[in-house]
Every structure is written in C-alpha cells, then in structure tokens.
Image (spheres, rainbow, N blue to C red):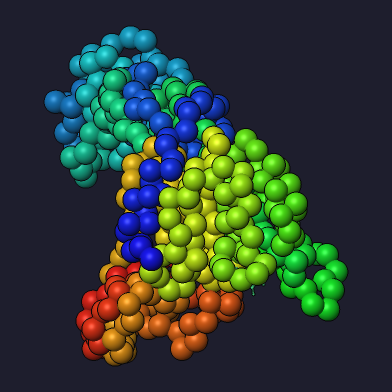
Amino acid sequence: MITVDAALSHLFALVEPVAIEEVPLAEASGRILAREVTARRDQPPFAASAMDGYAIRADEATPGARFTVIGEAAAGHGFGRPVNAGEAVRIFTGAPLPEGATRVIIQEDVTRGGDTITLGTDIGTKDHIRPAGCDFREGQSIAAPRLLRPADIALLASMNIADVPVRRKPQIALMSTGDELVMPGEAPGPDQIIASNTFGLKALLDSLGAEARILPIARDTVSSLTAGFTLAHGADLIVTIGGASVGDHDLVGQVAGDLGMDRAFYKVAMRPGKPLMAGRMGDAAMVGLPGNPVSAMVCGHVFLAPMLRVMLGFGACPTPRKTAPLACPLPRNGPREHYMRAALSADGIRPEDKQDSSLLRILANAEALMVRPASDPARSAGEMVEYLPL
Ligand code: AMP
Ligand code: MG
C-alpha cells in the first residue's frame, strides 16, 4: 500500500498537457486559456464621457458660468472640432471627448435655454471622463493557464480577441464494470442496481474541463472487459469503475495487464478507496477505481481532478484544500488517510455519522470531504482541520 501523496506522484507521471487549439470566443467559456493573450488595442481607445452632460474646459467650470452649445458628441459619433473658451458640446455616455474639453458637467447640474447653458451652484469636482486606456492598454496580457469565466470572456472580447488558444478538452472514457449494473432508465432485474459512478464522474470531470464519455457497461468477463477497453480507444485517460479488488469476479487488473497496462501501483492507504490501480495503456493513462459509489467519487476528487489539471496545463498539485474548525471532537484515526463526508456550518465542520462508502445520499448532502491524516491523534472541537470543498 502506498500513501495518497505517493499515488498522486505516480498518477502525475502518467499524464501530460494535451494539445492547444483555437476556439471562437463564444465557445471559450469554461475552457482553459493555454497561452498568454495580449490586448490588441487600448480600452477605451479615446478619452470618453462617463455621463450624459456637457463637455467644457475644466478651467472654466465655476458655478453659474455660461457657455454656448456648439454641437453634439454621441457614442460612435465624435464632435470632430475643438472646444474653445466659453463653448460647450452636448455629450453622451461613451462619446469621445472633443479636443480641448477636459471636463463633463452632468446634465442634472446644468440649466439650458436655447443654445446657452448655465452651470448650477453645486457642480462637484468630478470630471466624469474615462481616460484613454483606463481599463487596459494595448499589449497588456491575460496570463495562462486560466479557467475562462464569463467575465474573462467579456474582457477578451473587449481586447478584440476573436479566437482563443485553449487546451483541447482531455478525452476521458468511463467504464462501469459489473454483472449487477444497468444504465439509468433501464429496467433492472431483481439482482441488479443502477450504474451511478460513471454519471457522477462524468459530471465532475466535465465541470473541470474534460470531455468524458460513458462507455457501455462491461460485464465481469474477460471478453466483455476486453471489448470495453477497445471502445475506449482514442481516450487520453481510461477510467474503469469496480472490479479492481481481489474477488473472483474482479478481472479489471488481469484484463488491463493482458492488454499491456504496465501497472504503476495498486492499493492506496486511504478511506474510502483502497483498491486503486493505475498505469499506462498504449497511448492512454488508465486508472481503475473501486466500485463503491462514494469511493469512486472521492477518488474522482482526490486523484482524477488533479490528473485532469495536469492535462489542462495547470501543473502537478493536489486538489486545493481549505481549513475549518472542528464542530465536534474526533477519536484518533487509523493508519489510512480518511476522507470523511462532512457538513459545514457556522460552528465549523462536522463529519456525518454514517461514513459507509456505499451511501450516495450522504455524499450528496455533504458539503465537504474532511481530510484526516493517517494515524491522526484524537482532536478536540475547535481545532483546525483540512477539507476539500464539494
Ligand atoms: P466492486 O469494486 O466491483 O467489487 O464493486 C463494489 C461495490 O460497488 C458493489 O456493491 C458494486 O455493486 C458497486 N458498484 C460497482 N460499480 C458501480 C457503478 N458503476 N455504479 C454503482 N455501483 C457500483
Ligand atoms: Mg464488481
């Protein structure tokens, strides 16, 4: 048995960053920016009015001053001529500031009669101008790698970047194994249950930037598992679920070995999730997860997510942890690192009473996987502990 950290080091060695592709901006949300990109222009490209009002020379902005309105500047339509002493230009938000104008008086602070305006008694001190380049300058960059969020997409658009270099989505093939399994929506026989793990893992991995593909369920036979691996062809990462233990019907390790998988390790000192195998299999990395639903999902968070981040160019590091105070005391932990389903509240973090690795409803209600190091001593309420947010 090896530690979680040692297992992660092995897993990181099995994967590498996938290729970079360009996608249209409208399809880039949720993708991983793969190369630094730089703004193609200043924003705003000219000094612009931030309000509707009148553009004048700032040195003439005194309460009660009068000006002659000589024209108009609107968004997309500059005035085109300079503003001289005693002159004002009617201006609207987003319009380029006319040459010579250095202040905008908002329309609420102005009285207009015909072509003349008179400034009010309280015009404040703000110039209501957005200087050229106040948002960003041409050549300013967004660093990579970066998960592109909606605000990033707006920024890229504003920088005039129509096509975005992103990592191609890592292809992950997910295969449930077991004679007892049927797909959701099918009619299970009396001895059967519904395959849940592939669906939970697809949801997790897709949300992190992968393109996961659910293969047909493989039966607990050499031929069915062999056929399953054939269907996984082309994937960057093949994940099997179940059949990884040492029972008579646990054939995944044997079949993968026959197909050339050179196994990097087997069994990790963790709860849940002990039987875990991994290695290279042809062009793909292969990970065999335990079948218990909570074990499979925990291994998804602890192992598959960091592997995926390597494939997306983020470098090798464990899933980031947070800390919270314990809401209750805890007995000492055994020799395996324990990922406990836990609730978060104002009192801190509290593990659920039932930690059986088959209980999906408890996992679904949990907000955190509280991490107990191997052989951690007993802890009192209030001590700080680490957790993975769910
Ligand atoms: P195994 O690792 O194949 O011995 O499976 C351990 C437990 O997990 C058994 O109770 C299986 O029925 C269950 N199991 C295995 N694969 C899945 C799956 N894809 N979805 C839900 N339960 C599963
Ligand atoms: Mg099985």
Quadrant holding the N terminus: bottom left
Give the total number of marks visible in the rendering. Answer: 0
Can you give x and y, in whole percent of width and height, for residue 237 in the image?
54, 44
Q: Residue at x 54, y 45 (%)?
A: 261
Q: Is residue 117 visible?
A: no
Can you give x and y, in whole percent of width and height, for residue 368 in the image?
42, 71
Give left or right: position of 288 versus 94: right
Can you give x and y, in whole percent of width and height, for residue 195 in the image?
70, 65
Q: Is residue 257 visible?
A: yes
- As displayed, is residue 264 above or below residue 163? below
Front position in the image: 104 or 322: 322
- As displayed, is residue 288 above or below residue 142? below
Can you give x and y, in whole percent of width and height, for residue 273 in the image?
48, 68
- Which of the 4 quarters of the picture holds residue 112? top left
Front position in the image: 262 or 295: 262
Give left or right: position of 82 versus 306: left
Q: Residue furthest left?
A: 59
Give left or right: position of 22 versus 198: left
Q: Residue at x 21, y 38 (%)?
A: 126
Q: Residue at x 43, y 43 (%)?
A: 14
- Which of the 4 quarters of the picture holds residue 342? bottom left
Front position in the image: 288 or 154: 288
Quadrant holding the C terminus: bottom left
Q: Residue at x 55, y 37 (%)?
A: 282
- Which of the 4 quarters of the picture holds residue 109? top left
